[in-house]
Image (cartoon, rainbow, N blue to C red):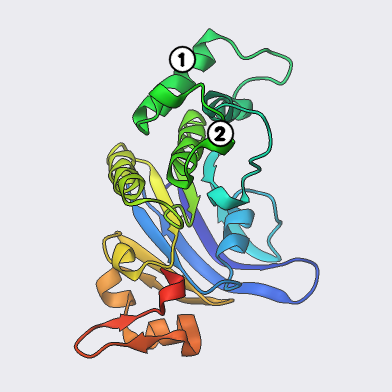
Amino acid sequence: MPLSVQDLAASYGGPVVLSGVTFDAEQGERIGVLGPNGGGKSTLFRVLLGELRPLRGSVRRPPRLGFVPQTERSRLDYPVSALDVALMGTLSRVPWWRPVGRAERRVALAALERVGLAALAGEQFGELSGGQRQRVLVARALVQDAPVLLLDEPFSGVDQTSAELLERLLDDLAGEGRAILVATHDLEQARRFNRVLCLNRRQIAFGPPAETLTRPVLEATYGGEIVTLPGEAALLPPHHH
């Protein structure tokens, strides 16, 4: 099993910010991670990536995890090309003293090809659209060749074309046996995943969408932020989409 978490709790040196998290991710599985801002999604990812030591509990994980941060949190003022950003994915595999060679460039170009951006390899990363930047960050994660991919709200601020391409790509990657965790606010998208993990400073629920995305679970996850439209399932307010 690529990833297994048991009774995880985490803090940043003060009060506990996340507790009681127990789940596993199988090969080829897409898991939606739902929760309000400040609910613990980013904290969970930081623990999984080894950036934050758990307060208690255990994490069994592969040596390499691919991570796709939110594109708006990526520094845009460096004069780097899309290819340069994709090449950063080789840093986890290539010894620091060895210059990046032709083989690494081939892998990075293939990853850009896979996200539909090979033609823009030489373009400045900061001048690409939000959706294109997000896809470059996915290419960087692909270059890491990790069995588990973590994506932090990859669809926020992304145009329709990039969103559809990203969703197809995630399906393909799961089909190749990668486990994929996607932090998202999009309930409709979460319903299409294999399983859903709901967090609000603690684990609220984990399981298949049909069993997990119920009104009581969503209320416990999002508190008073839930609104209901006549004849519709529970929906989140517009600022979460």
* Quadrant position of residue 187: bottom left
Crowding near pointer 2: few (<14 within 10 Å), some, many (20+)? Answer: many
Nearer-the-camera pick, 200 or 16: 200
Amino acid type for the residue under numbered disc 1: Arg
* Of the two numbered discs 2 and 1 in the rendering, the one whose residue sits closer to the viewer: 2
Does 228 sit left or right of 148 as displayed?
Answer: left
x%, y% of residue 21? Answer: 53, 69
Q: Which residue is mark 1?
A: 106
Q: Which mark is residue 125?
A: 2
Q: Is residue 166 above or below residue 53?
A: above
**Quick one: 212 or 218, which is closer to the camera?**
218
Q: Residues within 10 Å of mark 1 (few under 14, many from 20)?
A: few
Q: In the figure, residue 184 lies in which quadrant?
A: bottom left
Q: Single out the residue that lies furthest toward the right.
A: 13
Kindly report the distance in space between the C-alpha atoms of the residues bearing marks 2 and 1.
Answer: 19 Å
User: Is 92 situated left or right of 176 in this image?
Assistant: right
Please name the amino acid that badge 2 sits on.
Phe
SS class, disc 2: helix
The relative height of residue 172 versus residue 116 in the rendered view (above or below) is: below
| Quarter of the figure that contains the C terminus | bottom left
Q: How many numbered tags mark residues here?
A: 2
- In the visual, does 3 lie left or right of 43? left
On the question of residue 62 being in view, the answer is: no
Residue plotted at (49% across, 87% down): 223
Mark positioned earlier in the residue sequence (2 or 1): 1
